[in-house]
Amino acid sequence: MDKKKSLFLLTAAAAGAVIYNIWKPVKSNLPVITDFDINRYLGTWYEIARLDFFWEKGLKNVTALYSLQEDGHIKVQNSGVRIKDNKPKQSIGKAKFQQAPHIGSLKVSFFGPFYSGYHIMHIAGDYEYALVFGDNLDYLWILSRTKDIPEDIKNKYLHYAQQAGYDIEKLTWTLQE
């Protein structure tokens, strides 16, 4: 095989991998909650912990505000404050159910047609605490309606995440002032 043909095949394979990762279906291999009530989930959540990724790196006081839109989609407004210069940062996206509305599996987009999974694994209290996984082991959030979380709920969520294969040592514990 000549060099030109090898380079073409390598480029085509790389492009195919990129396209697959962009357009692959949003899924999770673990069971999500099946008695989900979006109306109880709406409102403000404080981020207690996360696996850091580019948008949230270096942020404190991170919150997510969920509100139901007329078209049935959910508006997602993520906010935080950059630790280095105390400047606010905000991102607005939309979420929609992957299946029936009582199944806690959504897909969220902040960038046009590109969606990521948002899977509610556990809800504790009266929709006071939530454990959310992404589509892979790079995304995890522990959320609370207040700026802290009881130790027993935190430990339960950490244990579940670790059993699911997450490296909980890599969690960033969000500073909430």
Image (cartoon, rainbow, N blue to C red):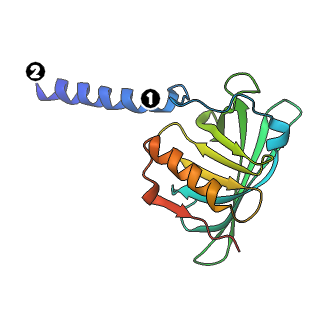
6 in relation to 145, above or below: above
Q: Residue at x 62, y 53 (%)?
A: 142
Q: Is residue 156 left or right of residue 39?
A: left
Determine which residue is flagged by label 2.
1
Q: Nearer the viewer, residue 161 or 172?
A: 161
Decide if residue 111 is in sight here.
no
Q: Is residue 3 at least partly visible in the picture?
A: yes
Kindly identify the residue that appears in the image at 83 percent across and 30 percent down: 72
The residue that appears at 80% across and 36% down in the rendered structure is 38
> Which image quadrant is residue 80 in?
bottom right
Q: Residue furthest right?
A: 70
**Residue extending furthest front?**
152
**Residue 128 x, y percent position in the rendering:** 77, 51
Residue closer to the observer: 138 or 147? 147
Q: Quadrant of the N terminus?
A: top left
Left or right of 55 in this view: 19? left
Report the side of 88 relative to 140 (left or right): right
Q: Give residue 97's position: percent from left, percent from top.
A: 71, 29
> What kind of residue is marked 1?
Ile
* Label at residue 19: 1
